[in-house]
Image (cartoon, rainbow, N blue to C red):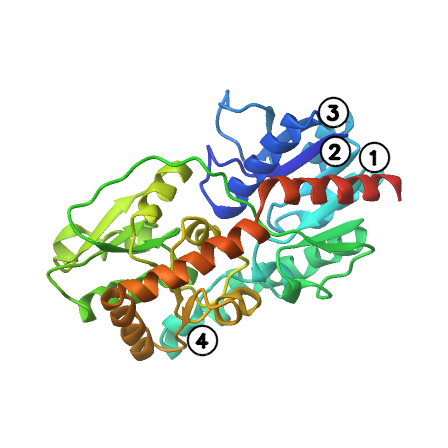
Amino acid sequence: MKILIVNQHPQDVVGGSEIQCSLIASSLSESGHDVIYLALNGSRSRYDASYTVVTAQPGFQSVKQALLVHRPDVVYWRFNRRKFLESMLACKQTGTKVVYAISSFTDLLKWSHRINFQELSWKERIRIACSIQFLRHLLAMRVNYVGFYLTDGIIAQLQSQTGRLPAKKEIVIQNSIAGEREDFSWPKPYVAWVGSVKGVKNPETYLELAQQVQRDDVDFLLVGDIKNRYKERFQPENLPPNFYCLGLKSNAEVNGILRHALFVVQTSYVEGFPNVLIQAWMQGKPTIGLFYDPDDMIATQQLGYVSGNFAQCVKDTQTLIDNETLRQEIGQRAYAFAASHFNREQNMRKLESFLQEIIDS
């Protein structure tokens, strides 16, 4: 197969969907497929990758040009909905089959936005909701939603995401994680949080958790790129003595950090399927979800705790810190579950089969 993967590239923007796309591109290329990664908004002249990377801007003309030049059998689209409708029209005009891979809960919403109104005052909510910029964004997202009617298939990460989008064909293929790991050491036992430090991830609650659970024997580490609005809040002079920001780390470095963590805390309000959960389970670590539990996996498989509120999260954190036997029991279940459900080779075979089915349809 000749496959065009469309997203931003992780060497331009580090995010979960970009990391997944690069992993998929590498795996498909290793399996003998002709893979071209169309890096939208790409800023590099050269990419360090085992597959072909070309850059383009989002939009009808640039996507159409890429399709005419490379003539893929199928497009694997995992970019957001900006200029999505016109890009799908380009696929239709060139006779190219396309599958859309869901990355976030916002992909499922007709009137999609990423503003976390829960953390805003009522005045700020009214101001934003009534702003021309916000209304224009909502309208654009609603118009681009029509693009889903032009796709040939939908790939969901979770069973709960199925049946939510117009789809001729639909399948669930869960994320996979590259297993490479760089060793990491820290002078104390520690709890870990991993992700982009932005509103929907709710990082300030993790900081509040560290302030509530101040102990001399445990540190709280935050790993990830800190977005502008949070830079001042997470300056070293504004942090408690048990809290450390490690900045952006590679996938291998993150695996090493998680390998030696006591457990992982995830504070997002809602997600697609955060890579860090899979990474934590693959490293045999329990997870605490403050609110979010993808397909109820944490609860039903007993992979940690889903706290539901901050006070319970503090209690769950204390419990796991103090009970090594419990951590080991949960960690063993987590590893067994991850090994059987997020196997890279199995997921790639499933993806290959689905893409071929789309091409043949």
For the image, the number of numbered tags is 4
Which tag, 4 or 2, sits closer to the chain's start? Answer: 2
Q: Which residue is labeled 3 in the image?
A: 70
Q: Which residue is labeled 2 in the image?
A: 64
Q: Residues within 10 Å of mark 4 (few under 14, many from 20)?
A: few
Badge 4 marks a residue whose secondary structure is helix
Badge 3 marks a residue whose secondary structure is helix
Q: Amino acid at mark 3?
A: His
Alpha carbon separation for disc pair 4 and 2? 40 Å
Badge number at residue 76: none
Which tag, 2 or 1, sits closer to the chain's start? Answer: 2
Task: Judge from the rendering whether residue 56 lies leftward or rightward of residue 211; answer left or right.
Answer: right
Q: Which residue is labeled 4 in the image?
A: 126
Q: Position of residue 89 (x, y in %)?
A: 78, 44
Residue 141 visible in the displayed image: yes
Alpha carbon separation for disc pair 3 and 4? 47 Å
Q: Amino acid at mark 2?
A: Lys
Badge 1 marks a residue whose secondary structure is loop
Q: Relative to 36, say whether 10 is above or below.
A: below
Residue 110 visible in the displayed image: no
Q: Amino acid at mark 4?
A: Ile
